[in-house]
């Protein structure tokens, strides 16, 4: 039996003899054949084996990397859960199956949610808070971004990544107050239907019963295990497969995590902000030189905000509200796409001029809304208003579009290891969520609190932390969109990766602007953020464009060079390190069917019924 045959079991859960008022999401209640299938897939790889489109009229789950998490989300939908219930179940499960490596219970969350009954879009920010007692954020030790640095150095230009220490002292200073669990609970309280504790069942099951180490996890341990081994708690985490370094096929158990999740399920998220976990977090972070207090933890609150929007070719496109930075990338980018009329031209993988323009737009919007001083000065010299609210207007796009080749910019490097989730339930509610560890795998702190590795996300955001009030919310770039055709939702996206902005713009241009087939767009060459080729003081036109090696033929590349572009083709490993991935779900306006797609070697896995 194959994973795609899960539709056959659309009513299986209701046939298991559960009481009418009972909800049980534990994998022990899943059909045995289906459970074996998803566990085998998870143990082999996080990527699909073939291209396929997935569709269903009742519910759809599309996410990153974890077939087990997809099945957990579908189980929530089949038992009457909302898109919020399913999204929470998926997120909790996939962090567990990924061992807290690329997404974290000590990470952050951003959500766009469409509630069909009220025909309204909501925005939730559960980003990091800084510490009230961190007086000198500019002096926070730098974290190890060697994976990105290695990728940068594969190019002729060494890029803008300076040599970083393997691990600087006072690792506790690199930590921040996490928002993930508060965000999950807030989403559930607002939009959920199933009991909160039930949503944790799949995650707790796999924490208690273990998971087989797959090739990706073996690689993570081999390259980043040295940081976990820095502390006694990290060493205990590493040894949960029975040896010093987990290998492919080993079963990895997480009993401490299971206990933490059980406590959160029973007591709510406050267990992590005011309860024993919070106390242990403060104790260990302070032991490692951090400045956190229990007050920092207990004062944490999510932010419900008004989503921001623009129109694009007659569609309405919503993005997260402030303090998110993503609207100033995506909505401004869409306005520039419309101004340049790229929807009337050929696809970027066929027309070098379109690829060039997409790269320009991604470059210009990358640092927004806080523009580089030289960029701001240049635009002001042209009498262009650069205030954040102005950047979202059509007038700004009209003024900036003709100047794209003249604007100077220097791009920041920010790792974005994350998971994205899009869920549509039978009532038409939509959850578009991104949650992230917001650093390279596990971070380098080695701090593990009751089964949860703590990331080093302050170690590359010193400038941002210095620009906000002590104890304030750190803006993030997690990107989700919900697109409406009239008053009817048409598409939702949630993106991850260092190149999440160009990839999101690519999907919106091709699927919304041109009505291209989603599978075709996902299989197209990756659009890469070219930060790694940036030289200090360079202009957009002087910076080399990064192309995946072998993705385009020689004629196409030569045509790019004839347009005045510097081009560097980067290796497959570098492409994987810096590319973006956009989870996308589409609702057919005629039939109401929901569908998504998977492509080989991609990270998107989906399920529907």
Image: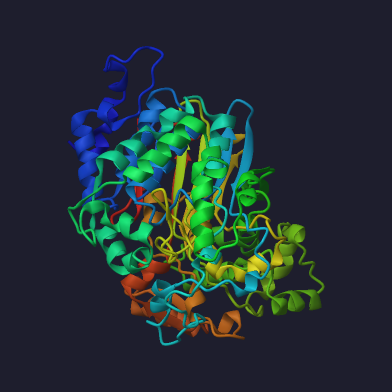
Question: Going by the image, does 22 lie left or right of 270?
Answer: left
**Front position in the image: 162 or 285:** 285
Question: Going by the image, does 355 lie left or right of 401?
Answer: left
Q: Where is residue 47 in the image (x, y as percent from the top left)?
A: 29, 53
Q: Residue at x 66, y 71 (%)?
A: 136
Q: Where is residue 519 in the image (x, y as percent from the top left)?
A: 37, 51
Q: Where is residue 26 in the image (x, y as percent from the top left)?
A: 32, 30
Number of marks in the rendered image: 0
Question: Going by the image, does 472 lie left or right of 206?
Answer: right
Q: Which residue is drawn at 26% across and 38% down?
A: 4
**Front position in the image: 409 or 71:** 71
Q: Is residue 37 above or below residue 510?
A: above
Q: In this view, does 535 lie above or below 280?
A: below
Name the quadrant of the N terminus.
Answer: top left
Name the quadrant of the C terminus.
Answer: top left
Quarter location, residue 186 = top right
**Front position in the image: 467 or 82:** 467
Is residue 494 visible in the rendered structure shown here? no
**Front position in the image: 462 or 602:** 462
Quarter location, residue 325 = bottom right
Q: Position of residue 323 (x, y in %)?
A: 67, 53
Q: Residue at x 66, y 55 (%)?
A: 473
Is residue 131 visible in the rendered structure shown here? yes
């Amino acid at each position: 039996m194959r994973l795609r045959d899960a539709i056959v079991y659309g009513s299986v859960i209701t046939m298991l003899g559960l009481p009418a008022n009972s909800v049980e999401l534990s994998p022990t209640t899943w059909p045995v054949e289906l459970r074996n299938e998803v566990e085998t897939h998870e143990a082999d790889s996080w990527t699909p084996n073939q291209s396929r489109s997935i569709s269903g009229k009742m519910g759809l789950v599309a996410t990153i990397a974890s077939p087990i998490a997809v099945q957990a989300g579908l189980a929530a939908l089949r038992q009457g859960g909302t898109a919020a219930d399913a999204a929470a179940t998926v997120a909790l499960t996939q962090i567990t199956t990924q061992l807290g490596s690329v997404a974290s219970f000590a990470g952050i969350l951003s959500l766009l949610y469409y509630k069909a009954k009220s025909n309204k879009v909501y925005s939730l920010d559960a980003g990091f808070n800084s510490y009230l007692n961190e007086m000198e954020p500019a002096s926070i030790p730098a974290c190890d971004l060697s994976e990105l640095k290695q990728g940068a150095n594969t190019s002729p230009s060494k890029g803008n990544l300076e040599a970083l220490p393997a691990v600087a002292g006072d690792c506790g200073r690199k930590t921040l107050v996490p928002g993930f669990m508060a965000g999950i609970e807030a989403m559930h309280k607002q939009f959920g239907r199933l009991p909160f504790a039930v949503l944790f069942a799949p995650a707790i099951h796999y924490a208690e019963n273990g998971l087989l180490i797959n090739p990706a996890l073996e690689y993570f341990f081999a390259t980043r295990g040295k940081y976990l081994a820095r502390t006694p708690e990290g060493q205990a985490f590493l040894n949960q497969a029975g040896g010093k370094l987990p290998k492919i096929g080993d079963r990895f158990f997480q009993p401490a995590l299971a206990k933490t999740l059980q406590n959160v399920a029973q007591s709510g998220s406050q267990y992590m902000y005011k309860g024993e976990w919070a106390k242990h977090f403060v104790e260990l972070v302070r032991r490692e030189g951090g400045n956190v207090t229990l007050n920092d933890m207990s004062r944490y609150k999510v932010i419900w905000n008004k989503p921001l929007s623009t129109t694009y070719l007659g569609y309405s496109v919503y993005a997260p509200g402030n303090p998110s930075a993503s609207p100033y990338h995506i909505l401004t980018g869409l306005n520039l796409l419309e101004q340049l009329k790229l929807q009337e031209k050929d696809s970027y993988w066929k027309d070098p001029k379109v690829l060039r323009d997409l790269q320009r737009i991604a470059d210009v919007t990358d640092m927004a809304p806080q523009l580089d001083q030289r960029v701001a000065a240049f635009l002001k010299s042209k009498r262009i208003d650069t205030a954040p609210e102005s950047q979202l207007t059509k007038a700004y796009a009209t003024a900036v579009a003709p100047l794209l080749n003249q604007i100077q910019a220097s791009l920041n490097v920010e790792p974005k290891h994350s998971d994205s989730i899009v869920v549509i339930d039978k009532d038409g509610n939509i959850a578009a969520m991104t949650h992230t560890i917001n650093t390279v795998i596990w971070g380098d702190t080695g701090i593990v609190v009751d089964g949860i590795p703590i990331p080093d996300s302050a170690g590359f955001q010193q400038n941002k932390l210095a620009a906000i009030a002590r104890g304030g919310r750190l803006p993030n770039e997690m990107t989700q969109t919900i697109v409406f055709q009239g008053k009817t939702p048409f598409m939702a996206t949630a993106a991850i990766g260092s190149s999440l902005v160009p990839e999101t713009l690519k999907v919106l241009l091709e699927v919304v602007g041109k009505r291209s087939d989603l599978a075709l767009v996902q299989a197209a060459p990756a659009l890469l953020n070219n930060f790694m080729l940036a030289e200090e003081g360079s202009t957009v036109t002087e910076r080399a464009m990064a192309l995946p090696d072998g993705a385009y033929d020689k004629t196409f590349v030569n045509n790019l060079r004839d347009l005045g572009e510097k081009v560097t083709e980067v290796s497959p490993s570098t492409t994987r390190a810096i590319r973006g991935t956009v989870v996308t779900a589409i609702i057919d306006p005629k039939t109401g069917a929901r569908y998504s797609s998977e492509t080989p070697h991609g990270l998107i896995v989906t399920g529907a019924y």
